[in-house]
């Protein structure tokens, strides 16, 4: 990250960073609220998207939309924090924006919309986008200053690989029709969701230390 002398630009980046910081926290809070208000709902057996239909479905659907918008904000902050990034970094940023857009659309089109096909499609695109984004950001930070981005770059690689592992486990749980799909999905979601928050913290920390 280069030195930022424009205070307005610095404040804008910090705002976008805060979007990323609060995104997974707010998502978790609303998810818990929606789960509590849904009789018979099991985090172990049921998918998160199941909360988007039926009673109080608006809570989870709004949750998807807010998280999507906040993720887009985080991506903009990431782009501004390293404007000289390589092509792979910039593609990673754009994939993070697409991820946020797809998550937002998952709230606009819940499981019961057109037999759930559209919801399933945008969710799949969101998952693939955020996995690729983490790995491309890792690749794009290869020549970045190590003292600033080194440990974060390694974290992006580990988070991306772990996301792939948990996505495979999720698919196995679905194909084998076992009774812990909810747990498998939450393990997968936790990894990129935490990456969003950690990225926000990293951007805010870096920007806060610039004059």
Image: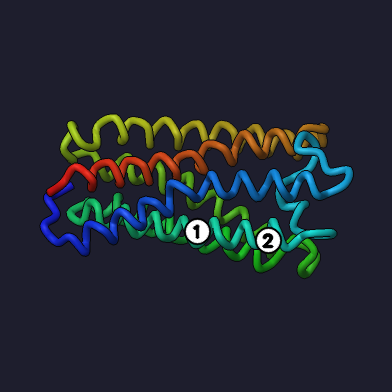
| Residue in view at x 50 percent, y 31 percent | 162
What number is the disc on residue 89?
Answer: none
Which quarter of the figure has residue 91?
Answer: bottom left
Residue at image location 56% in from the left, 60% down from the top: 66
Q: Position of residue 25 (x, y in %)?
A: 54, 44
- Characterize the local packing of mark 2: few (<14), some (14-19) or many (20 or more) Cα atoms within 10 angstroms: many
- Percent x, y for residue 184? 68, 34
Q: Residue 18: x and y, percent?
A: 39, 51
Q: In this orientation, which residue lies closer to the viewer: 1 or 10? A: 10
Q: Residue furthest right?
A: 40
Label 1 packing within 10 angstroms: few (<14), some (14-19), many (20+): many
Viewer-proximal residue, 38 or 82?
A: 38
Relative vertical location of residue 118 with respect to residue 83 in this rendering, above or below:
below
Which residue bears the numbered disc 2?
61
Mark seen at residue 100:
1
199 versus 87 height, above or below: above
């Amino acid at each position: 990250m280069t030195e930022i002398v424009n205070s307005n630009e610095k404040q804008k980046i910090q705002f976008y960073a805060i979007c990323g910081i609060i995104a997974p926290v707010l998502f978790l809070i609303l998810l818990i609220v929606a789960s509590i208000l849904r009789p018979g709902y099991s985090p172990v057996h049921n998918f998160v998207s199941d909360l988007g239909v039926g009673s109080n479905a608006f809570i989870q659907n709004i949750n998807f939309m807010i998280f999507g918008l906040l993720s887009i904000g985080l991506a903009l902050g990431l782009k501004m924090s390293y404007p000289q990034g390589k092509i792979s970094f910039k593609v990673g940023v754009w994939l993070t924006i697409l991820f946020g857009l797809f998550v937002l659309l998952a709230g606009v089109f819940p499981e019961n919309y057109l037999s759930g096909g559209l919801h399933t499609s945008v969710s799949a695109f969101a998952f693939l986008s955020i996995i690729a984004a983490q790995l491309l950001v890792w690749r794009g930070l290869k020549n970045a200053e190590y003292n600033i981005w080194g440990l974060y770059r390694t974290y992006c690689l580990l988070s991306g690989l772990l996301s792939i592992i948990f996505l495979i486990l999720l698919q196995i749980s679905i194909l084998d029709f076992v009774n812990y799909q909810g747990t498998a999905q939450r393990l997968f979601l936790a990894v990129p969701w935490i990456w969003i928050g950690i990225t926000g913290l990293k951007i805010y920390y870096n920007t806060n230390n610039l004059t």
